[in-house]
Image: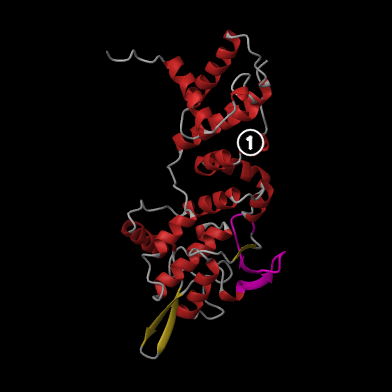
């Protein structure tokens, strides 16, 4: 005999119990539910389910508490913050094209389908790793076209320097002469990494293959014609076209340019860097960073799942200024 259909309320309750089993949540924190458990439960759904669906799950759990005379110890303000954040993520997904973030694994996969001894691929890979680990806008490290290079607007080799980090490690600093938020320029920077996405290796390889002069675009490609050597600035079109070809060879869906900045932000958050540190590295003003987090579920959902203990500060960062919570 077929099993009777599960009603919506039963399905919602079952989803919560499955979540608790998968995450080894102690029975004592099921009911009365602990705030951290509710935060984690909502974060696993944020960005993947509509705000209405998530709210139905939460209020079903609260109704179960009331029905069984179990205290509901979730403060209204905290519940309001959590559901508001879930609403923001849902709106971002419904109004913006989905941009899958770059990851370290993505970069390593793409590297396998680039010829890093060729001028174009050497420049593209160096640009990709610098943009990723520098959390840069793509327009800050490429030109719009190959003909509109301007050393007062675009980074040149003369704008690159080496500094020492807090542990004595070398840090490569790229000064962008003019950015979206600062007409006087800003710095992006990275340190060497211990894997095949290493921006330091990519940078040294690019310098060896392309040998750009000090006044050329940093990621110029070298062209030799007879005894004449010229350098062509790396344009956004050339950069994305080459990575699209490599992505298809890797059987990956081609990425958009902004996916690099999304991925770099997520990578540093997942490594445990504080929100303030990542905000500073990404060169955001406070309000801009909060807006960025709200608009990119690809950043928020994995970070919230990996760091449930930081949910409260994260929610406050994302949802301020808050309207009055319901009484």
Is residue 178 at least partly visible in the picture? yes
Residue drawn where x is 69% and y is 48% of the image: 276
Q: Observer-nearest residue: 36 or 248?
A: 36
Which element type, helix, strand or loop, lies under badge 1? helix
Magenta stretch encompasses residue 169: yes
Residue 285, image x, y percentages: 66, 48
Instruction: Please state, as top left, top right, bottom left or bottom right, where the N terminus lies in the image.
Output: top left
- What scheme was used to colour the molecule? secondary structure
Q: Which residue lies furthest to the right in this view?
A: 166
Q: How many labels does the image show?
A: 1
Instruction: Please state, as top left, top right, bottom left or bottom right, where the C terminus lies in the image.
Output: top right
Residue drawn where x is 48% and y is 27% of the image: 18
Magenta stretch encompasses residue 256: no
Is residue 314 at least partly visible in the picture? no
Q: Which residue lies furthest to the left in this view?
A: 1
Residue 227, image x, y percentages: 39, 91
Q: Observer-nearest residue: 16 or 181?
A: 16
Residue drawn where x is 31% and y is 59% of the image: 249
**In the picture shown, does residue 205 fall above or below 249?**
below
Q: Observer-nearest residue: 192 or 175?
A: 192
Q: Mark 1 points at which residue?
A: 311
Q: What stretch is highlighted in magenta?
A: 159-182
Residue 243, image x, y percentages: 39, 61
Residue drawn where x is 43% and y is 43% of the image: 98
Left/right placement of residue 19 relative to residue 81 reads left
Residue 52, image x, y percentages: 49, 23
Give neighbour class at mark 1: few <14, some 14-19, many 20+ (Cα, 10 Å). Answer: some
């Amino acid at each position: 005999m077929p099993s009777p259909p599960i009603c919506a309320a039963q399905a919602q309750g079952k989803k919560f119990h499955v979540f608790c089993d998968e995450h080894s949540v102690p029975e004592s924190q099921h009911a009365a539910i602990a705030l951290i458990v509710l935060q984690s439960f909502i974060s696993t759904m944020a960005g993947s389910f509509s705000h209405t669906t998530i709210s139905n799950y939460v209020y079903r759990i609260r109704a179960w508490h009331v029905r069984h005379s179990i205290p509901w110890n979730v403060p209204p303000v905290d519940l309001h913050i959590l559901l508001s954040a879930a609403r923001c993520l849902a709106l971002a997904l419904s109004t913006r094209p989905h941009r899958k973030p770059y990851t370290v694994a993505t970069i390593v996969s793409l590297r396998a389908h680039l010829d890093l001894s060729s001028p174009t691929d050497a420049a593209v890979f160096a640009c990709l790793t610098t943009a990723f680990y520098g959390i840069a806008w793509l327009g800050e490290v490429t030109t719009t076209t190959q003909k509109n290079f301007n050393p007062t607007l675009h980074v040149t080799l003369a704008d690159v320097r080496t500094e020492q980090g807090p542990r004595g490690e070398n840090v490569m600093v790229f000064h962008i002469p003019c950015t979206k938020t600062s007409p006087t320029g800003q710095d992006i920077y990275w340190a060497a990494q211990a894997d095949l996405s290493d921006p330091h290796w990519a940078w040294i390889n690019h310098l060896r293959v392309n040998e750009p002069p000090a006044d050329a675009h940093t990621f110029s490609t070298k062209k030799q014609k007879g005894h004449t050597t010229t350098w062509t600035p790396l344009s956004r079109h050339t950069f994305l076209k080459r990575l699209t070809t490599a992505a298809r060879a890797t059987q990956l869906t081609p990425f958009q340019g902004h996916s690099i900045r999304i991925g770099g932000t997520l990578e540093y958050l997942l490594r445990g860097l504080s929100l303030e540190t990542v905000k500073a590295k990404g060169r955001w003003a406070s309000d801009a960073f909060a807006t960025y987090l709200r608009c990119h579920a690809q950043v928020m959902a994995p970070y919230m799942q990996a760091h449930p203990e930081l949910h409260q500060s994260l929610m406050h960062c994302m949802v301020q200024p808050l309207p009055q919570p319901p009484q």
